[in-house]
Image (tube, rainbow, N blue to C red):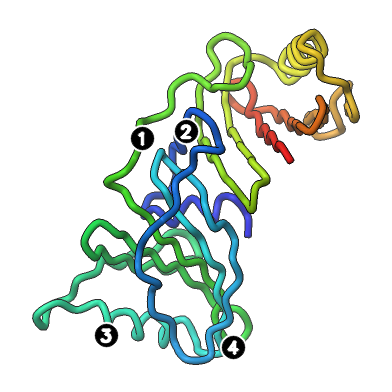
Amino acid sequence: MAMRSLLLLMGIGCLDFSGLAAAGQVPAVNCARPPFPTGTKLTVVAQQVAMNGTPMSILAMANRLPPAAVLDFYRHRWVVNGHPAYVQYRVGPWQVVAHRDGSCFYTVQVQAQGSGTEGLVGVSLPGEAQGMPGQPSFPAPSGTKVINDMASNDGGKIGHTWYLGNRETVQQNADFYLRTLVHQGWSRQIANHPPMSHGAVAMMFQKGAQTVSIVVEPAIFGSTLLITKVRR
């Protein structure tokens, strides 16, 4: 699923992910498994991530039932003393239902897929959030702000993804990373430079067991940057 779809799982349209001090410190989510309608097929999207500083796990789900039936399933189960213990809302094409059980927060977002349903299920511990993002922990031009920040630990593969924004042009951002990362000992693997036809630049660097991919795109205010760093 696209990252934008994952952002909905916390119950708001645009998350400010807060990476932890190091991606390897992402804590596990110790919550009960959420219920699923009979026949649901599950795929692990992210077993151990930190979004907005909040420990979280994400599953993709698919079911032959229509979205209305899947939502009914959760509305009937998330009831306390005969009263609804959930909130429900819509974000774009997604219908979302969310429920809190103690310190654990469950969010289910679904949409139609043919005659059935596809969706994402997030389980999080919002009470363990470890701060809000400010300046990126990866080199960036002065004035760059964090839009989203996600840290992950996928079976020992440590990852960190930043979505950033600044007032620099695409060219200025590209020049910054070509200059700065090479100076820091990164070797350039790929660099679509000068910009592609739609104004974006894609770059990839490597240093030992670490790789960094950078995509810079023009924005009304300057540029957005999607940076992914992985250590194997």
Percent position (x, y) of residue 66?
A: 50, 86
Mark 4–mark 3 distance (CA, rounded to whole Å) = 22 Å
Residue for point 77% across, 15% down = 181
Q: Going from the N terminus, do you reach mark 1 or mark 2 first?
A: 2
Mark 4–mark 2 distance (CA, rounded to whole Å) = 40 Å
Q: Going from the N terminus, do you reach mark 4 or mark 2 first?
A: 2
The residue to which callout 4 is attached is 115
Tell me the kind of residue under disc 3.
His
Query: Quick check: 103 above or below 196?
Result: below
Q: Report the residue that reaches farthest toward the left.
A: 81
Residue for point 54% across, 58% down = 47
Residue 130, labelled with which disc? 1
Residue for point 63% across, 60% down = 1
The residue to which callout 2 is attached is 20
Question: Neighbour class for label 2 at 10 Å: few (<14), some, many (≥20)?
Answer: many
Is residue 170 in view from this perspective? yes
Mark 3–mark 1 distance (CA, rounded to whole Å) = 33 Å
Q: Secondary structure at mark 3?
A: helix
Q: Are marks 3 and 2 in contact (CB under 8 Å)?
A: no
Percent position (x, y) of residue 112?
A: 55, 78
Question: Neighbour class for label 1 at 10 Å: few (<14), some, many (≥20)?
Answer: some
Q: Are marks 3 and 1 in contact (CB under 8 Å)?
A: no
